[in-house]
Image (tube, helix red, strand yellow):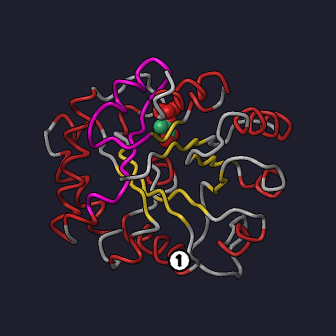
Amino acid sequence: MRKKILAANWKMNLLRDEAFHLYKEIATFSDSKEIFIFSPSLYLSELSSIDGPKIGAQNFHFEKFGAFTGEISLDQIASCGANSVLIGHSERRQIFNENNEVLKLKVDAAIEKDFDIIFCCGEPLEIRKSQNHVEYVIEQLKESLFHLDVLQLKNVSIAYEPIWAIGTGLTATAEQAEEMHLEIRNSISHVYNVEVADSISILYGGSCNEKNALELFSCPNVDGGLIGGASLKASSFKEITNALYGLH
Ligand code: PEP
């Protein structure tokens, strides 16, 4: 059985007290569920002192230490009590120019430190319009992820996030999500084997909210969600959690 996973990407939102309160509210319904909170890194240390869902960093540098002003390392993140990272989010790719090569270095660094990884992939609108979305996404995975061996891949979940759906209110239809998730799973099967493909959780992200979550999570190859905007309100995130865990 694949793990059902829900991840909240808080991005550059929430002041310290707001983050603290939201985390505590989420902790009231996260028990025994696989929930990750990708908080601003500033708050990781404080959040890790509260009993609640796993916490992770939205970004890090692949080097271990040194003269990289403004950056943070995996050891520093671990020293604040977090052992999970997001890699390959489209905002990191597009705004901060992280390409597949850099993302591969980040994947290797996180694997070396035994972090859990949620690796994001997804196509921009023009690629979707030109019907090349499947090839585009599989190439992202081949160039940054598929060099890992089977054991290393156990630390990884994949989040498919069509860029045109992130923060836009436009959601992929359940059919579009299922199509891509199946393609991703088939590609894992080709590169590794069917057992590995069946064991990896593939999350959907992109304007997933309390209204559409159930339909998206009902797709056989959608194993959970990476949630941006709708993770900033405990009530919405709770409904999404209930949709995933069958508590509706
Ligand atoms: C995201 O940033 O990963 C995301 C899915 O955002 P939103 O849910 O706001 O589209």
Residue 213 in picture, x, y percent from top left: 42, 26
Does the magenta portion include 225? no
- The quarter holding residue 140 reads bottom left
Q: Is residue 114 left or right of residue 93?
A: right
Q: Viewer-proximal residue, 66 or 194?
A: 194
Residue 232 in picture, x, y percent from top left: 65, 30
Beta carbon of the mark 1 residue lies under 8 A of ligand 1: no
Q: Residues within 10 Å of mark 1 (few under 14, many from 20)?
A: some
Q: Is residue 233 left or right of residue 120?
A: right
Residue 35 in picture, x, y percent from top left: 58, 46
> Which residue is drawn at the image coordinates 14% and 38% (left, top)?
130
> Circle 1 — which element?
helix
Q: Viewer-proximal residue, 107 or 186?
A: 186
Q: Viewer-proximal residue, 76 or 37?
A: 37
Above or below residue 48? Residue 143 is below
Above or below residue 189? Residue 1 is above
Residue 20 in picture, x, y percent from top left: 81, 40
Reading the image, the residue beneath label 1 is: 109
- The quarter holding residue 211 reads top left
> Which residue is drawn at the image coordinates 71% and 66% (left, top)?
77
Does the magenta portion include 221? yes
> Which residue is drawn at the image coordinates 29% and 69% (left, top)?
143
Q: How many marks?
A: 1
Above or below residue 180? Residue 154 is below
Q: Is residue 203 left or right of residue 135?
A: right
Report the amino acid beneath label 1: Ala
- The quarter holding residue 197 reads bottom left
Above or below residue 210? Residue 70 is below
Which region is colored magenta? 197-224
